[in-house]
Amino acid sequence: QVQVVESGGGLVQAGGSLRLSCTASGLLNNDYAMLAMGWFRQVPGKMREGVSCISWRYGLTSYVDSVKGRFTISRDNAKNTLYLQMNSLKPEDTAMYYCAAVSGYASCSASWSAGVYRYWGQGTQVTVSS
C-alpha cells in the first residue's frame, strides 16, 4: 500500500520562505523508473490547482506560471523524498498543499489535472500573512 505524507507547512509573513517535504512509501523500485510527483494546492471553494511536478528518473520539472522564479521542486533519490522550496511567498499562495504521485510517466506537466495522479497525501497548510 502506497502512503504519501507531506510536511513543512506553516505560517509565514509575505516575502518569507517555506520548504515542503513529501515522502512516498510502498512504491516498488520499478515504479521510480517512470514516476511523476507533483505538488497541488487548494483553497476552500476552488478546484485543486497544479503547482509543480517532477519526473523522478530524469528530474524534468514543470511549474505553473504564478510560481515560476519563486518555487523550486526537487527530489532526493537516496531519501525518496520530494521537496518544494517556496521563496518570496505571497498571501495568494495561502492554501492547503498536497503531494501526489503517479507511475507510468517519464515527464510531467504542472497543467495536469488532479485526476492524473493516483496517490495523494493528506495535505499541509501554508498560510502567508500580509
Image: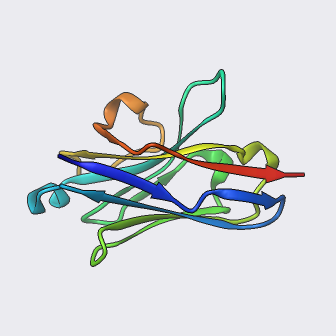
Q: Is residue 105 above or below residue 84?
A: above
Considering every residue shown, the one lying at the far right of the view is 130
The residue drawn where x is 29% and y is 62% is: 56
> x, y percentage for residue 90?
79, 52
The residue at 19%/60% (across/down) is: 32
**Is residue 107 among what the camera can see?**
no
Horizontal side of 16 relative to 41 (left or right) equals: right
In the rendered image, residue 99, in percent from the top left (x then y), is placed at: 43, 49
Q: Which residue is more in the foreground, 126 or 38?
A: 126
Figure check: 65 above or below 76: above
Question: Residue at the spot x=73%, y=50% of the render?
Answer: 127
Q: Is residue 13 left or right of residue 95?
A: right
Q: Residue furthest bottom?
A: 78
Is any atom of residue 128 visible in this view? yes
In the picture, measured across the screen, residue 70 lies left or right of residue 115, that is right
Question: In which quadrant of the rendered view does residue 45 lie?
Answer: top right
Q: Is residue 39 above or below residue 61?
A: above
Of residues 121 and 85, the one drawn nearer to the viewer in this rendering: 121
Q: Which residue is depicted at the point 78% across and 52% down? A: 128
- Residue 60 in the image, given as x and y percentages of width and height: 37, 61
In percent of width and height, residue 88 lies at 76, 63
Colouring style: rainbow
Specify the quadrant of the image occupied by residue 8. bottom right
Q: Is residue 88 above or below residue 4?
A: below
Numbered-mark total = 0
Compare residues 26 and 54 and report the one nearer the observer. Answer: 26
